[in-house]
Image (cartoon, helix red, strand yellow):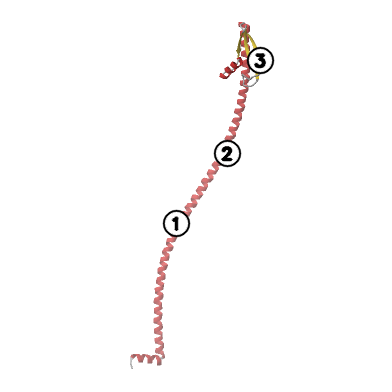
């Protein structure tokens, strides 16, 4: 009987031998499966290591982003403070501008009142000086020199030759025999006054 036949006979007849063979076969399978699991675990460990590296890189990136966000938040806080300061300055400037506008309005009103007063004083002064000068000339010519007679000539300019429209014209006239000289008295004179006197003479 060969080895093979003997082995098969033992498997058929010897239960203890049969269990021993079954045990050996099961152990080999277990060892094979353990090897496969070991390989799978090693692959998983490699993947975990790679993932750990990726996670580490992501952690660094997240930390960098957090620092950037923190820096941006600080900048936002500083900008907010600067904007608030500028707003306060704008409010102060607006108040100052409003106060200046009120001062300018007040000064403008004061200047208008002053100009009106000066104009009124000027008109009174002009009337006063013209009247005083007229009386002085009249006294000089009539009483002292006795050369001319001074008359006040008032007439209605119907054609509007003097002022461009019909109006009453008043002027002083120095009279001597047939000679008549028109005289005008002004505190201040200009070319228009000369032209006016010329038109009166027409």
The residues bearing labels 1 and 3 have C-alpha atoms spaced at a distance of 103 Å
The residue tagged 1 is: 64
Q: Quadrant of residue 170?
A: top right
Residue 74 lies, in percent from the top left, at 49, 51
The residue tagged 3 is: 154
Q: Is residue 199 above or below residue 110?
A: above
Residue 106 lies, in percent from the top left, at 60, 31
Label 2 residue SS: helix
Residue 45 lies, in percent from the top left, at 41, 69
User: Quick one: label 1, few (<14), some, or many (20+) residues within 10 Å?
Assistant: few
Q: Is residue 148 left or right of residue 18?
A: right
Q: Earlier in the sequence, mark 2 or mark 3?
A: 2
Depth check, front residue: 116 or 14: 116
Q: Residue at x 52, y 46 (%)?
A: 83
Residue ranking furthest to the front: 159
User: Residue 95, which numbered label?
Assistant: 2
Q: Earlier in the sequence, mark 1 or mark 3?
A: 1
């Amino acid at each position: 009987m060969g080895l093979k036949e003997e082995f098969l006979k033992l498997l058929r007849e010897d239960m203890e031998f049969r269990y021993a063979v079954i045990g050996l076969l099961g152990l080999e399978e277990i060892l094979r499966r353990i090897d496969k699991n070991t390989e799978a675990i090693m692959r998983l460990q490699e993947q975990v290591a790679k993932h750990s590296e990726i996670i580490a890189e992501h952690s660094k990136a997240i930390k960098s982003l957090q620092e950037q966000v923190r820096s941006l938040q600080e900048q936002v806080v500083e900008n907010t403070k600067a904007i608030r300061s500028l707003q306060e300055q704008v409010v102060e400037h607006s108040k100052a501008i409003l106060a200046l506008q009120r001062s300018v309005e007040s000064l403008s009103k004061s200047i208008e009142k002053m100009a009106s007063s000066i104009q009124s004083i000027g008109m009174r002064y002009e009337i006063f000086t013209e009247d005083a000068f007229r009386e002085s000339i009249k006294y000089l010519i009539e009483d002292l020199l006795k050369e001319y007679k001074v008359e006040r000539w008032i007439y209605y300019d119907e054609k509007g030759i003097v002022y461009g429209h019909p109006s009453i014209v008043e002027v002083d006239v120095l009279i001597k025999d047939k000679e008549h000289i028109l005289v005008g008295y002004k505190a201040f004179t200009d070319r228009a006054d000369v032209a006016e006197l010329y038109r009166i003479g027409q």
